[in-house]
Every structure is written in structure tokens, then in C-alpha cells.
Image: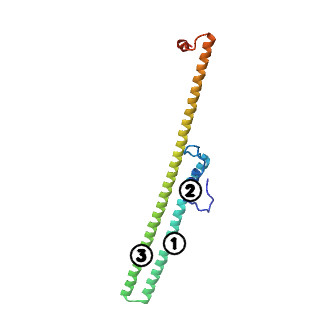
Amino acid sequence: MNSDQGVEFDVQAELNRLEELILDNPRIPFTRKTVVDEEQLLDQLDLIRMNLPRAFEEAVEVLRQKEEILLQAEEYAQDIIESAQMRAAQLLDEMGIIRQAEMEATQIRQQVAQECEELQRQTLGEIEQMRMQAMQELEQMRQVVIDECEDIQDGADDYADAVLTRIEQQLTDMLRVIRNGRHQLRGEPQGNSSEESNS
């Protein structure tokens, strides 16, 4: 299941829908267990699983675009610096003024490079934080679903055991009635334990 192209995928919103899917379903009476539509639950998990890589790719694409803009800005600054250097070389003959312009150009270049590096490091940190948060929330939701399923299975086992116990008691009662009937047909007293054991 893929989301429509061009529509931004909101990880938090889809996780909220997954939580609503679990909480909005009816509960089993007298228990804390919830009846969950397995197909809807798996579809929602598939939607999140299949779109997480695309969400990360979009974040990386934003980072790449930022890097391109910063690179263009750095190239533009470099062009300005080179143009200023050429203009200074043409207009000024004194070595001291030219050297001063070169020093200022170097400082500008270093400053731009530092700002680009800092912005890139900050953006990568934000992307990693978003990824970790999304993975943690997805793991928490997965554990909740597993716990709910285990509770439902335990309840089903208890119910099955109660039904089998009731059937076993009914069969025991029926067997006693059959034995008593046989004793009556034979004209034997019903309390003859040795005869019951031989029957």
C-alpha cells in the first residue's frame, strides 16, 4: 500500500491513526482486551513501514537542496571575491592593499565554509533525531499490539479450558447414569463398587 505521489507523508499522524485503530475498537466484556481488525492493523503497519523510507528520502532531499543552495551561495561569494581581487589588481598597484584584499577574501571564504559545515551538521542531527523518534514510536506500538494479542490468546485458552472442564463433568455424570441404568437392568444394587469397576 503506497500513499499518493506528491502528498507529504506524516509519520506522527499515521502512528496516531494506528493508536486510534487499537483504542477505538470494541472491548471484550468484563475484560481489558480489545477486538482488533487484523487486516486494518496490518494495512496500517504496512503503510508506515513502506513510507518511512520515503519520508527519510524526502528529508535527505531537503538536506541536499540546502547543500546545493549553500554551495551556490559559496560559489557566488567566491565569484565576488575573485572579481574583487581582479578589480583590485587592476586598480591598485600597491602590494599592501592587494594583500589586505586577499586576507579578507580568505576570511570570508573560511566563514562561509564554517557556516555551511555547521548547517549541514545541524540538519543531519535533526534528521537522525526524527528517525530515532519514529523508530521508537513504531516499536512501542508494535509491542502494544503484541501484548494485546497475547492477552486475547490467554483469554481464549482460559475459555476453552472452562468449556472442556464443563464437558468433562457432563460426560462423567452421563457415565454414572449409564452405569446405574445397567445395574438396574441386571437387578444389582447401585452401590456395588466391584461390579462398577468390572463394567
Task: Please provide percent x and percent y for residue 37.
Answer: 61, 47
Rendering colour mode: rainbow
Q: Name the residue: 55% across, 39% down.
A: 155
Q: Residues within 10 Å of mark 3 (few under 14, many from 20)?
A: few
Q: Name the residue: 45% across, 69% down.
A: 119
Q: Name the residue: 45% across, 71% down.
A: 116
Q: Name the residue: 44% across, 75% down.
A: 112
Task: Please provide percent x and percent y for residue 186.
Answer: 62, 10
Amino acid type of the residue that numbered disc 1 sits on in the rendered structure: Ile
Amino acid type of the residue that numbered disc 3 sits on in the rendered structure: Gln
Residue wearing tag 2:
16
The reply to whether the C-beta atoms of the residues labelled 3 and 1 are less than 8 Å apart is: no
Task: Please provide percent x and percent y for residue 198.
Answer: 55, 12
| The C terminus: image quadrant | top right
The first of marks 2 and 3 along the sequence is 2
Element type at mark 2: helix
Residue wearing tag 1:
69
Nearest to the observer: residue 171 or residue 83: 171
Q: Residues within 10 Å of mark 2 (few under 14, many from 20)?
A: few
Marks counted in the figure total 3
Nearest to the observer: residue 156 or residue 185: 185
- Disc marking residue 111: 3
Amino acid type of the residue that numbered disc 2 sits on in the rendered structure: Asn
Task: Please provide percent x and percent y for residue 31.
Answer: 55, 43
Residue at mark 2 to residue at mark 3: CA–CA distance: 43 Å
- Disc marking residue 171: none
Residue at mark 3 to residue at mark 1: CA–CA distance: 16 Å
Nearest to the observer: residue 75 or residue 113: 113
Element type at mark 1: helix
